[in-house]
Image (tube, rainbow, N blue to C red):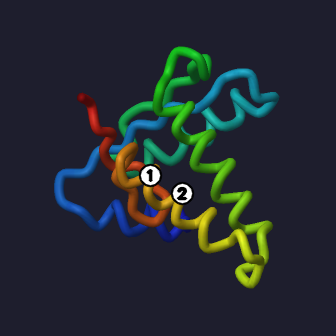
Amino acid sequence: MNNPAVVEVLKWDNVDISIVLEKGNRHDQAIVKEFERISALDCRFKSIALADKKSAVALQVADFLAYFNRRLLCLDRSHPRYGDEKAFFDEIIKNVVNHDLFVATDFHFR
């Protein structure tokens, strides 16, 4: 609960947090156990689910965000492609997901 994005979201009124994680990680059970510990301390942490990535659009979007975020982090800002890469990423995410501090808060359903 030290993550700045989570701390910021928890300041909002009427917030409940549900988490969906990609299953198949060797730490799945430890993650669930830690979530249960945290939810016992703060009732706003409502649920956790482990899902197959192919069954959850949110997980696919998370992979996309992680891939491009990592790509931008590894690309020096002075690199000639940096501006184009960042512009592409910004254009795509504004149409995919509203996010604040890399916490998805709303997925656009059309």
Instruction: Quote the CA–CA distance across marks 2 and 1.
Output: 6 Å
The answer to whether residue 84 is visible is yes
Decide if residue 107 is on the left or right side of residue 75.
left
Q: Which of the numbered marks, if any, corresponds to residue 17? A: none
Q: Quadrant of residue 99?
A: bottom left
Are there few (<14), some (14-19), or many (20+) residues within 10 Å of tag 1? some
Give coordinates of residue 70: x percent, y percent.
72, 58
- Relative to 9, say whether 59 is above or below: above
Residue positioned 77% across, 69% down in the render:
75
Identify the image quadrant of the C terminus. Answer: top left
Q: Is residue 17 above or below residue 1?
A: above
Left or right of 73 on screen, residue 15: left
Give the image location of residue 30, x and y in percent: 71, 35
Residue 59 vertical placement versus 97 (above, below)? above
Position of residue 81 in the picture relative to residue 5 (left or right): right
| Residue placed under numbered mark 1 in the picture | 93
- Amino acid type of the residue tagged 1 in the rendering: Ile
Q: How many marks?
A: 2
Residue at image coords 68%, 72%: 82
Q: Residue furthest left?
A: 13
> Residue visible at 58% across and 17% down?
54
Q: What residue is rendered at 25% in x and 51% in y?
A: 15
* Crowding at mark 2 (Cα within 10 Å: few <14, some 14-19, many 20+): some
Q: Read off the residue under disc 2.
A: 89
For mark 2, give the secondary structure: helix
Three-letter residue code for mark 2: Phe
Marks 2 and 1 close (CB-CB < 8 Å): yes
Q: Position of residue 76 (x, y in %)?
A: 78, 77
Image quadrant assignment for residue 108: top left
Q: Residue furthest bottom?
A: 78
